[in-house]
Amino acid sequence: MANAFLTSMTDRLRKAALAGAAGLSLMAFVAGCNDYTSANPPTRATPGSVANPNPGPTGPTGPITSTLQGAILFAESEDDMTPISSPSFALNSVGDVQVFVGWTMLSGDHQAEVKFIAPNGNVFMAKTVDLPNTGKTTIGNASGTWVSFPVGGTMITARELTGTWKVEATLDDAAASSASGRLTLSPAT
Amino acid sequence: MGIFTLCALYSSRAQAAVLKRMFSGQTTIAAAATTRTITLPATIDLTKSFLVFTMSFNEADPTYAAVSGQLTSTTAVFRRNDQNATVVNIQYYVVEFFCGVKVQRGATNIPDTTMQVDVPITTIDRTKAIPLFGIRAPGPNFSRNDWAQVTFTSNTNMRITLDAVPQGTATMEWQVIEFQDATVRTGTVNFTATQNSQTATLSPAIANLNKAWLVWNHKIGDPHNLDRIGEKMIRGTITNTTTLTFDRDATGTVPAPTTINLTYYLVEFLDDTVTQQGIINMTTAQLSNTATITAVDLTKSIVLGGHMMREGRTSAVGTDNGGSGWMMLDFTSATQVRATRGTTLSSTSSMGFSVVEFLSTSPVCFDTAVNSSIAPGLRPGVAVFAGNANGDIFAFDSNPANATYGNLLWTYAEPVGAIDKRFGISAATSTVFVSSMDGCFYSVNSATGARRAWSGAGTFAGGSIPCSSNTNERLADTLAAAPVRHGPLNTVFVGTRNTSGNPWTEVENKVWALNSTTLACNWVFNGTCAGADGTTRVGMISNSPTLDIPGNCMYFTTQETLATDHTVFAVRTNTNGCNSVGAAGSLAWSITTVGATNLGSIDASPALSEDRCTLYVGTNAGAIYALRTGGAGCTGGAAGTAKWTTPYSTGTAGAFVETIWAQNSRLYFSQGNTVRRVDDLGTSATQRWSQAITGPAMPLVISDFNRLWVGSSDGKLHQLCADTATTPCVGSQIDVQSNVQSSSAAVVSSPTLDVTTCSGSPQTCTVFIGVDTGRIYGKRVPY
């Protein structure tokens, strides 16, 4: 059996190898583990804002002060970067969820690490984004950037990883300046 | 206005420990020697290895009898402070893991001016960590400075506390061991001068006594009782699921009785590790005795006592000789444990021991640190390739015959975006092809981890690492589909996942045909090699194209934006491919409907029948269509028309996972929290069976075993009966589950089979699976 068995499995392996989210009304500004509701709802973001496409600064040049407050906002797509409240998306109706990551009182060059944490608590994806001194997007009092979170057609939809996802952002590795927000992915309808 | 709730509680990220190997033996620190060095048979990874040992001697001066031990990557070294004629007998175990255990170690001096030292340690999870140590203080008596209480005062600090300053500098060699798939709870127990026994009550109760291991240490307060050794030595036992008992034989009276301050660490393993506990008593005349245990695998088991792994209780008084209570423990057979002491001192003694057997259903595992729930890539018998959601790419030695089995072979050095689907692996060209969510495409030398080419320099010119949104670097907004290589054409095909915004939209998708060696563009379906868009509305491509190599045809599926968007495409991979006239890269046919039914979005790759005449397409609406390919020699109808009179419907919306496994008219697939087998009957389809499984991955089917395996989102690898016609299933075979992670929420990938590992009678093989906790595990199948 062995040879035929291995041959058949090899064939199967070869064949296998060959085969091979929207609007926001606000939002909350958050810092640490406390919940804050912004007294000044953010204005509509500039459509088409995307994460800085160019290699970023080599390190933070601006101060991180104790007054920094992080903001995590969500929008459904790059075509409509209007922040939405209670972000919730059905798996079959979303491509990329747009996530705004920003901080108040932010100046200078910075970097942020953005973690997308699955409902089971495991970090599904992490990205480092640049927050250069110039070119940041401003929403309300927060300056930052939009980050794409691919959902449609990814393993998230294939494996139906539904539930409440958490987005955590940390500025320049400083835990004190972290921010977080949540979004809900629901089964295909 | 929404308010976010923060600080959600997350499940633990449990990581099953997988033993790599264990070295054990008996040795001595001989008379006139202060050190004994054991050369290990192989170089070990110190971050995943620990040393435990027990010992016996007949000596009252700790200068000659207090022993510490420590590992280097090639040795185990045992030391005492000075030599005399005393011989110290040692039983040691060096335990190395592939993963699931993290170890840090050090040697800390305790000067003669202090009783307490804080030792900075790398951040630990105190709910999973224990300290093990040996301390050797200068003599001349076993007294207050020869015992130490060791606690974690924070996640980064270990505190060593004696009851008196050493008489000279004492040295503690220590290890902090984190069992990532275990819980550790700790507590303190104090003895007043007249107490012989103390208990600790556990709440909640121990879940399983056969997975509990009691570790403990203590300091003693005996300001004057230099010769009452029995007051100082403690036996610890797990009495029942809610009680730990610590006791001693001799209780001080006057002039200054001994107090005890004890810290215990109760380890409860959550993985396959099992434990046993027992007691070995000795009469006043016995130097050793044995206890019967349930049979263990001696290559995976350790046996230890209490404080410093060696302490039991003794009735000895009138002496400082610790040899009647500190004992050496070993296995005389798979079913017997022996305790040996260096002297009786005409005293009774009693040892509470634990046997820990590091069992695992995984023969090997690798650590990628971050979500790695895509099926691992494989060069059979050589290496496993893993990518994770950070974009890290790793190669691990997967050859069990190698000394470096399980070791990291290389890490790709350059930043790459998250990886969402399988790698393309070409053994012929020793290349790993990587589609990244950063939109760029990479080829990596599978032997060295060096970059061969990338889209920013091979497909385009002038790009610079790291990949950016510059259109001279990336092929798309994101690449989610696994690449597929056409060997005869030396071409790799990459489908794009353009979503919206700049510079592409969700209907400006393409399939790139790139030279496998250079990644130079051969042609682009629905675009140009310069990156311009074509004129066909092509939605996001979520999974790899499917190749009909003899037919020079490629099939792929897409999402739709408008109901009129076509979502199944056949493209010629060579001139006049797809059994029709046209150039390479041209469209042979595409469809948006079957009959009057709109197919809708399709994420899963189409699957080709073995005769290449039928294309099985699983739609996101939960239906399977059997489409005629119109290939050479195929009959029954035109390309793109339905073979079945009605499609098969699962009745549940949701994308099929990766693709359908089509074999001999049997279709195996995962969709909608269910794994199914559906049979193609020619003009219709019928479901043979279905099995509910949470978040199933694509199944791996091995007909010769009449089994299929599917990872799930419940931390398991499920083994299902494939139900081939010749070997029907029985009830007990329907769904046999094997824990990959103790966490019931871990996402387990589709398995990848290494055919070179198949052996034995009955035959078993190793499959590799990725988990979103960042681990790659091997599993022997069938199980």
Image (cartoon, coloured by chain):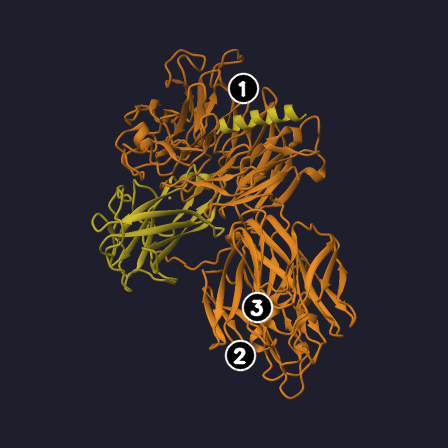
Front position in the image: B453 or B602 = B453
Q: Name the residue under label 2.
A: B164
Q: In this view, does B740 lie to the left or right of B347?
A: left
Q: Which chain, by letter, is orange?
A: B
Mark 3: amino acid: Asp
Where residue A105 appears, x then y in whole percent? 24, 59
Q: Position of residue A164 (x, y in %)?
A: 45, 51
- Cα separation, mark 3 vs mark 1, equals 87 Å
C-alpha gap between disc 1 and disc 2: 87 Å
- Residue wearing tag 1: B643
Q: Which residue is drawn at 50% across and 53% down?
A: B47
Residue at position x 56%, y 20% in the image: B610
Decide which of tag 3 and tag 1 comes sooner along the chain.
Answer: 3
Give the quarter of the image for residue A49: top left
Q: Is residue B558 above or below residue A109?
A: above
Which residue corresponds to the image point at 52% horizontal and 61% vertical from the top-left? B176
Pointer 2 or 3: first along the chain: 3
**Label 1 Cα crowd, 10 Å radius (few <14 / some 14-19 / many 20+):** many
Q: Which chain is yellow?
A: A
Compared across the picture, whether B688 is left or right of B513 comes to right
Image quadrant occupied by the C terminus of chain B? top right
Q: Residue B82 carries which label?
A: 3
Q: Give B208 or B392, whichever is nearer the viewer.
A: B392
Q: Which of marks 1 and 2 is nearer the N terminus?
A: 2
